[in-house]
Amino acid sequence: MSTPSGAERPADRHPVVTVDHLRKAYGSTVAVDDVSFTIAAGEIFGIIGPNGAGKTTTVECIAGLRVPDAGTIRVLGLDSRGDRAALHERVGVQLQQSSLPPKLRVGEVLDLFVSFYPHPLDPADLLETLGLAGKRHDYVQSLSGGLKQRLSIALALIGRPQIAILDELTTGLDPEARRETWRFIAHVRDRGATVILVTHYMDEVERLCDRVALIDRGRLLALETPPDLAERAGGGTHLRFVPSAEFPDALLTVLPEVQSLEHEGAAVVVTGGDAVLKAVLFTLDREGIALRDVRVTGGTLEDAFVRLTRHDHEEAPPA
Amino acid sequence: MSVEGTPTAGEGRSVSGRAFRQLLWVEVLQAWRQPTGLVWGVGLPIVLLIVFGNISAFKQPVTPGSSLTIFEVYIPVLFALSLVLLALVSLPTPLVAYREQGWLRRLSTTPITPVWLLAAQIIVNLALALATLLIVVLGGALFLGSRLPGNPGGFVLAALLVTVAIFALGLLGAAVAPTQGWASVMGGVLFFPLLFLAGLWYPLQNMPAIVRSVAGYSPLTAGVAAMQSAMQGDFPSAHDLLVLVGFAVVLGAAAVRFFRWE
């Protein structure tokens, strides 16, 4: 994904969303506990975390759907508890678990939403972009899950929002539709909107997000760029290959650059710092061993996600 | 995709007007495609009007010496039947479904207020009630030999008050029903006593005095009695009008107090 224009980091640009010491509880269950962050104009901001971590509650507070118990949220200079109509004219929302009246046609729902906003997008163009052009006259109840999801995205964006909040954007979409949706979201951002993305998919975060917040048990565990987050979890570099001849593990594990070595069937996976690649290639070449099916990967977000949230779970008392 | 100037005040108003008309249109479409209100709330009273209007025994005075025929006594009762079906079935069912499906919640993330959806739903059902009222009163007079209300002002006032009271009851049902199933159960439980006491199966005038005096405190019965007085040419009694106003105020306030959007 292209980086935002200019050398400045997104976090340095002027904030469009400021969340300050947000706290929200449902009865005795604390859903969000003292979370603070800012989102800059034109950024695609990801929010990840395990189920029930407080992601949805956080974005629902930003969207003005829930009232925080403590803390303040400012969105485009407006208090999220203040002028809701003014807020909702500028913020488009796609909610989890919200269905549309089944007996309406796609075009009718879209025309309804067009009437809500002062400067809406052209509904025909939007349907075309989201692959719904041929479904204009279909009843909502006859749409597949993926098509309903696309319609829901269309409704969030029809009002030309300055901020789009998308909760589980591509859940239920097939791989091709996901890629199209990603391209569309990047396009939305390139035209100046800020996007807040709640997701379970690390590939989505890697493809789209400028920064990502990791929330677990209502607390903000990390907030950085996806590569930094992956790096922070100590992923290092993984070199996976099939050697042309067997060799003793010690040949490589004695190297200072190598942290660990594992076997995956015929393949060998060596993990280490940045220099591990050169050291392994040099050593094996000296022994006359060739490498086939070579793959080099950095530390993944998935590693980081699992490591950071698992750590948290270990601290918890047994259920 | 961003700021293109903030809307002026005039623009804001036009957006509101357009949004409300569109919301109303969407409710009309759904009332047509799921025609519970149309079939039962309008259709059933019309069928009964035609049947009752063709029963020769119904041309007799309801009680010896009464100026109203049995058929004329039934005209306000048929309107009452329409009101109950519209206000207790056709109105709350979609509202509860919208809440269950998250549609009200979805709308509350847009610049419009979901109160408008409530208003649109009420307008659609009021229009159906008005259509039924016109059909049973004018249709009965034109084709089936009933007379027009002798006291039109009193009749309109009574019809208006009973409509408000029964719609408020339906809205309260929509406010407190947790699911669509509950909404139907509550509608069903209220349906028979309300209509029995309003004289759907047996004219009010022929009921024992004790039943009539108790029934007089039902909003539907008070409404029917008030409209029947106006049919005869009298202004509705203060008792009936007070009962109607009381129910309208109390039920309306309770519906506003307890309505939930999610």
Image (spheres, rainbow, N blue to C red):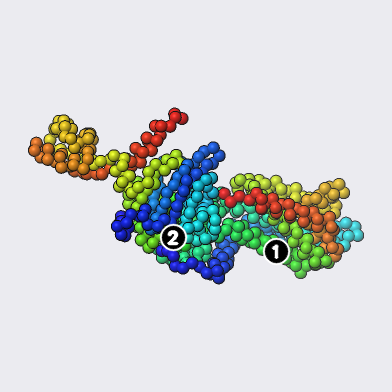
Residue position marked by numbered label 2 in the rendering: A162
Residue A287 in view here: yes
Residue position marked by numbered label 1 in the rendering: B130
In this rendering, position of residue A193 left or right of residue B225: left
Which residue appears at 54% of the width and 67% of the height? B12
> In the rendered view, would you say B140 is above or below A63?
below
Estimate the x, y position of residue B48 in percent, counting from the top left: 73, 58
Parent chain of label 1 = B
Q: Marks 1 and 2: which is nearer the front?
A: 2
Estimate the x, y position of residue B175 in percent, counting from the top left: 64, 50
Query: Which residue is more in the foreground, B197 or B58?
Result: B197
Which residue appears at 42% of the width and 40% of the height? A216
Query: Which residue is more in the foreground, B139 or A94?
Result: A94
The answer to whether the residues at label 1 and label 2 have Cβ atoms under 8 Å apart is: no
Parent chain of label 2 = A
Q: Which quarter of the picture shows residue B227?
A: bottom right
Q: Quadrant of the N terminus of chain A?
A: bottom left
In this rendering, the count of numbered labels is: 2
Kind of residue sitting beneath label 2: Gln
Estimate the x, y position of residue B42 in percent, counting from the top left: 68, 60
Which residue appears at 47% of the width and 60% of the height? A90
Kind of residue sitting beneath label 1: Leu
In this rendering, position of residue A284 left or right of residue A111: left
> In the rendered view, would you say A171 is above or below A103?
above
Please tell me the numbered disc located at residue A151: none
Residue A171 in view here: no
In this rendering, position of residue B222 left or right of residue B85: right
Disc 2 on helix, strand or loop? loop
Label 1 in the same subunit as label 2: no
Q: Which quarter of the picture shows residue B245?
A: bottom right
Estimate the x, y position of residue A75 in percent, counting from the top left: 47, 55
